[in-house]
Image (cartoon, helix red, strand yellow):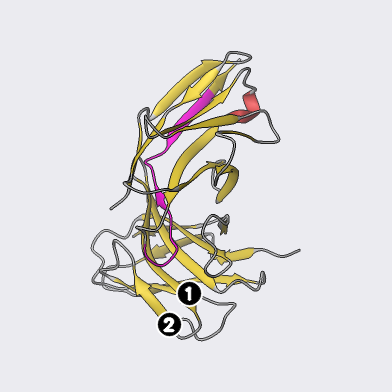
Amino acid sequence: AQSVTQLDSQVPVFEEAPVELRCNYSSSVSVYLFWYVQYPNQGLQLLLKYLSGSTLVESINGFEAEFNKSQTSFHLRKPSVHISDTAEYFCAVEGPETSGSRLTFGEGTQLTVNP
Amino acid sequence: DGGITQSPKYLFRKEGQNVTLSCEQNLNHDAMYWYRQDPGQGLRLIYYSQIVNDFQKGDIAEGYSVSREKKESFPLTVTSAQKNPTAFYLCASRKQGALGEKLFFGSGTQLSVL
């Protein structure tokens, strides 16, 4: 079975500082990887995803994530964060091992950007 | 605008009572999902449905029931057998058989016990 581990439950940073949210997964086969973001009292929104091809994927708001197959990681980074980036971030994995076309989510990382 | 609508936004359950959470989508998606969110535990899958009149248990189905009589609707009933129902419930949908496709989420229902 697949699993996802987000290594930090809380990440506090100051505005304009760089940030990295860590995600590791376990799977013996090829997978698809996702980062979703959740703002308070809302549902989740897709931030970015890796399906195949270039291992570096980017979102429209400056986040990027790099797929590292040897380390089974998919860490999320942003070089300079804004107050508006404060939210909870979820890493998720999907692959042939999951039945019914469903995702497995990590526990979430709360990113808090302080002025 | 296409999307997923969950109602109500807040719901309170009395001891021994069954309550039903509504989820409606107009995205023409075949697959629909119910997740439970607890602080520090991420999202856990309760039930999912890939086609009308068919659904499967997820990882934490005990104490819950669903129906899928229409493509647009996937209501979740929290039964009295669910002893710890307080949580944030999220409904989602996406294209059927679409590995790698994104999930579209509703804005959630917060269920609390009186």
Which stretch is magenta? A99-112
Q: Label 1 marks which chain's residue?
A: B
Residue B19 located left or right of residue A83: left
Classify mark 2: helix, strand or loop.
strand
Q: Which mark is residue B50?
A: 1
Q: Amino acid at mark 1?
A: Gln
Q: Residue at x 55, y 84 (%)?
A: B70
The structure residue drawn at horizontal position 50% and vertical position 83%, both measured from the top left corner, is B52
Q: CA distance from mark 1 to mark 2?
A: 7 Å
Does dot 1 land on a helix, a strand or a loop? strand
> Which quadrant is home to the N terminus of chain B?
bottom right
**Front position in the image: A46 or B37:** A46
Q: Residues within 10 Å of mark 2 (few under 14, many from 20)?
A: few
Q: Are marks 1 and 2 in contact (CB under 8 Å)?
A: yes
Name the image quarter holding residue B40: top left
> Which quadrant of the structure image shows residue B49?
bottom left
Residue A111 in view in this figure = yes
Tag shown at residue B54: 2
In the rendered image, residue A73, in percent from the top left (x then y), is placed at 41, 32
Circles 1 and 2 on the same subunit: yes
| Res B66 seen here | no
